Image (cartoon, helix red, strand yellow):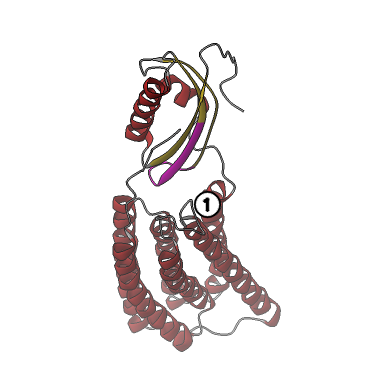
Amino acid sequence: MTHSHPVITDHRGIVQRVLLITLGLNIVTVGLKVTVGWLTGSLSLMADALHSVTDGANNVLGLATNRLANPHPDRDHPYGHQKYEAIGALGVAAFLGIACFEILQSAVERILTGTSDVTIGPTALWIMLIVLGINVFVAFYERRMGLALGNKFLLADARHTMSDIWTTIVVLGGLIGIWQGLQWLDIVLAFPVALLVFKSGWEVLRENLPWLVDEMAIAPEAIHQQVMQVPGVINCHSIASRGLLGRQVFIDMHLVVKPTTVEAAHRITEAVEDHLEDLYGPARITIHIEPREYTEDDITY
């Protein structure tokens, strides 16, 4: 006995524009890094370029999942399609894992075969400073838009770009060192760069799994406490929730109310739904009404 029709906000158009802008900028940074890496023979710079390739791949992935992650339900997907976004983020994590492996493999090969000389000039360093500037802009722009829209994918991608900034700073430091004659610095730096890539992949994975495995969204005790404040409610139990706070939450519960007529009981369930929607919305709430005599001590599964 529920009527809740949550207002679903669809920001996909804006997200798509953000992703297209960042994709363009990421392609520019990859091009610059690969050019400098190829001209100088720097392994740590090529590793950094690989990290940026995954940035571009993320944007493409984001554009694809963004088209699929329609929050509006349809006949085949009565609960909406937002999990596509989390699946996209898992793809990002996979990309990062592969990139990490590639970098480490190249570094080990170079150690075993002996170092090839890396040649650095002032031009290469200036180009890297421009790349750094673009990365900083992309990360802050994506983060700001991700927070404004409550978009998981943009936030994950911004975090990835943030790690890219640190990587570029480390590599830039290494290039300056090589310029001053410390040839071994290039290989040494390839390892922390690879670890940074791995770390950002792990964080993206850890953040999106709870959504995919329907982890509890709101503590049942918290829901119970709120529902008990609504006049006419005697008790509520068997409370469950899933989804993502601020995006779309699903709540279901059993409710014991004072009134004995269906109309009066229905009015209370509507009051409960409105109260929860205000607190946790957008939410889709299902309430099962039970007779007044019903007693239940447990509030949750």
Q: In x, y percent, where is residue 275?
A: 34, 28
Observer able to see residue 225: yes
Q: Nearer the viewer, residue 99 or 192?
A: 99
Q: Is residue 210 left or right of residue 244?
A: right
Give the residues in magenta: 243-252
Q: In x, y percent, where is residue 164?
A: 43, 65
Q: Nearer the viewer, residue 152 or 214?
A: 214
Task: Check disc 1 and give the amino acid type.
Answer: Asn
Q: In x, y percent, where is residue 208?
A: 52, 52
Q: Residue at 38% of width from left, 79% of height from top?
A: 27
> Dot 1, how many residues are within 10 Å of its Cα: few (below 14), some (14-19), or many (20+)?
many
Helix or strand or loop: what does disc 1 sit on? helix
Mark 1 sits on what residue?
A: 208
Q: Residue at 44% of width from left, 15% of height from top?
A: 260
In the depicted structure, whether residue 8 falls above or below residue 235: below
Q: Residue at 42% of width from left, 57% of height from top?
A: 159
In the depicted structure, whether residue 61 falls above or below residue 74: below
